[in-house]
Amino acid sequence: MRLQKYMAKCGVASRRKSEKMIDDGLVSVNEKIVTRQGINVDPDKDVVRVNKKIIKLEENKIYIMLNKPLGYVTTTDDERNRKIIIDLIEGVKERIYPVGRLDMDTSGLILLTNDGNVTNKITHPRNEVIKKYIAIVEGTPNKSELTKFRKGIMIDGKKTSPASIKIVKNYENESILEIEINEGRNRQVRKMCEAINHPIKKLKRVSIGEIDIGGLQFGEWRYLDDEEMKYILSL
């Protein structure tokens, strides 16, 4: 089995992230650091370590949704000792990791699993899984700004895919927007709103594809139900 595929199946990260971890020299096979892509490993014989920790295939697959509070980072550990979302998941023995990420100053829906195949399904650009956000921004976008947002905006030297945006409610100095994107670039929604001159004051993700945050309160989590799992596996 290819090393990056094995890492994904062990729940370390998606295949693409696993490849980067290999490039960064964080992975060893039988006590030797590996930086070359595409090597094969035997799950029954080889000892694979990531960040010096042995990884193994998890028999029990876990699928969780969490309403991430502000102030938490979406990683499994943090060198700067910031609060991590894994600390909010109690009673789960399996090694799980977040699917994609949310900024520290963004709240809302995040999925966690130890199933690398499901992670790949949700995060791979070809599947174009829609992520919906509710944003409070400064001022109210006008018609031309909304059109610019919908057609795609140049951020970080690359144009975003077409997106959806509508005004839910507007006040004197701010407005509430519903935004949908099918990408997952770094701080994308914030950068897009800044590009149309309406910086975000507050941002929350409320759905990923057909999986909705519902009545889940900040810091609460639950396992995905049968309908949600059926949707993920259908991608």
Image (tube, helix red, strand yellow):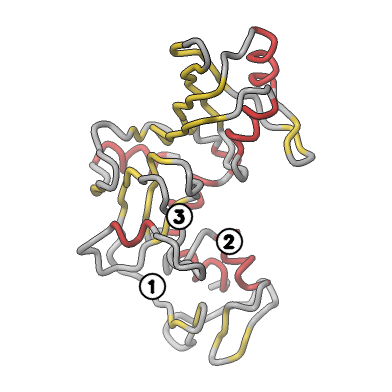
Q: Quarter-wise, where is residue 159 in the image?
A: top right
For image coordinates 44% across by 13% down, the residue present is: 168
Q: Is residue 229 left or right of residue 10?
A: left
* Residue 229, horizontal then vertical, whole percent: 31, 43
- Which residue is situated farthest in the front direction here? 173
- Among the 4 quarters of the image, the one containing residue 91: bottom left
The Cα atoms of the two marked residues, 2 and 3, are separated by 14 Å
- Foreground label between 3 and 1: 3
Residue at horizontal 47 percent and vertical 32 percent from the top: 202
Write down the residue under mark 2.
17
SS for tag 3? loop
Residue underneath mark 3: 74
Is residue 180 positioned above or below 158 on the image? above
> Rounded to the nearest whole Å, what is the CA distance between mark 2 and mark 1?
17 Å
Mark 1 lies on residue: 57
Q: Residue 180 placed where, x, y %?
A: 52, 26
SS at circle 1: loop
User: Mark 3 belongs to which amino acid?
Assistant: Thr
Amino acid carrying mark 1 in the image: Leu
